[in-house]
Amino acid sequence: MSTPARILVIRFSSIGDIVLTTPVLRALKQQLHGGAEVHVLTKSRFAPLLTCNPHVDVVHTIERTVQEVLPQLEEVGFDYVIDLHNNIRSRIVKRRLRAMSFTFRKLNFRKWLWVNTGINCMPEKHVVDRYMETLAAFSVKDDGSGLDFCIPESERYPRSRLPEVFTHGYVAIALGAAHEGKRMVSAQVAELCAGIAFPVVLLGGPEDAEAGAGVSALFGDRVINLAGSCSIQQSADLVRQARVVVAGDTGMMHIAAAFGRKIVSVWGCTTPGLGMAPYRPHPDSVIIEPMNRRRRPCSKLGNRCKYGTHNRCILTVHADEITQAVNRLW
């Protein structure tokens, strides 16, 4: 009986990027001839995204530096390293482990070219499909099953904890984003809530709690703010239970796609053409881009708008356009 190959997949951050690696993990676990023992190296705060994934055997984590975990990784004796992050830290790991490695091409120069000159040389491929190309030597294929997201039973969010008005469904609005250029402002969210008659759950991290409280205070029990009071998995479960999800170019958007939710994705400084659109979401999902879309992307990550203000692009998205999409999908 052959010994399963020991494979280390590296992706340090962030929420959305890690969720987008799940088709790779599934393909390695299910399709590799002779079997595979799949390990993942990530940052400790993102480990909960993977700990109950059935296609991951071991999750290794770091706080700040790979030096924290290198001795542990060396003891495992990996046959292969799949580097889906491709940065200085992942290169240090590959050098130390001396295993055969396969590295994702980030195409950063092409992204820089598009952002700074308007010349688009990016392939018309989703980043998930490009991740899968990194596995070409293993002869595994995309199985067409989309993204995975596993929520432990202990992290489920009971519908009974929501007000009675939420019994027949609700809209989940993700307030947070890693970068300001991807984030709707409070005025847009408030206008969106005013334009729909459905119950709304506001989601986000602790940094979004104040903004969420300000919006929910305008609408009574119909809009509740859970930003900052839920774990990542609890927020994901609320997304799973939602009838419609409104999100920017963020991790919650990709989690919604993993659950096949109807998504209204709202874009700011970035653009779906960079390869990060919702991956195989519900077929009725809608993408809404700013009115000045011809000048985008104006940032690779959404952290710095080249036109001078982080939110300049997303502010040109009218809340009534989002409202109409939500009403139609409901």
Image (tube, grey):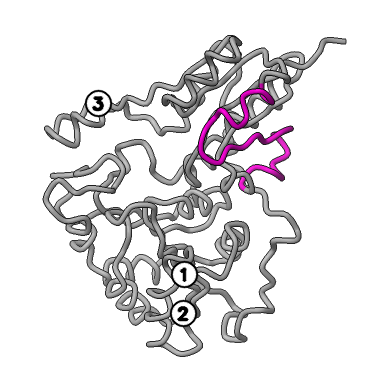
Q: Position of residue 316 (x, y in %)?
A: 18, 62
Q: Which mark is residue 306?
A: none
Q: In this view, does 6 lie above or below 268?
A: above
Disc 2 residue crowd, few under 14, some 14–19, many 20+, Cα 10 Å = some
Horizontal arrangement in the rendering, residue 133 relative to residue 182 (left or right)? right
- Front residue of this view, candidates 314 and 48: 48
Q: Position of residue 167 (x, y in %)?
A: 62, 80
Horizontal arrangement in the rendering, residue 68 relative to residue 184 (left or right)? right
Q: Which mark is residue 330?
A: 1
Residues at marks 1 and 2 touching, judged by CB atoms closer than 8 Å? yes
In the image, what residue type sits under mark 2?
Answer: Phe
Q: How far apart are marks 1 and 3 (CA)?
A: 38 Å
Disc 1 residue crowd, few under 14, some 14–19, many 20+, Cα 10 Å = few
Q: At x 41% / y 75%, what residue is drawn? A: 210
Residues at marks 2 and 3 touching, judged by CB atoms closer than 8 Å? no
- Front residue of this view, candidates 259 and 106: 106
Q: At x 53% / y 67%, what residue is drawn? A: 243
Lower sequence index among marks 1 and 3:
3
Q: Distance between the residues labelled 1 and 2?
A: 9 Å
Q: In this view, does 127 lie above or below 19?
A: above
Q: At x 72% / y 33%, what residue is drawn? A: 58
Label 1 sits on a secondary structure element that is: loop
Span of residues in magenta: 49-73
> Is 70 in the magenta?
yes
Q: At x 56% / y 70%, what residue is drawn? A: 229
- Mark 2 sits on what residue? 198
Mark 2 or 3: in front is 3
Q: Where is residue 68 in the image (x, y as percent from the top left)?
A: 60, 32
Horizontal arrangement in the rendering, residue 280 relative to residue 58 (left or right)? left
Q: Is residue 238 above or below residue 83?
A: below
- Mark 3 sits on what residue? 110
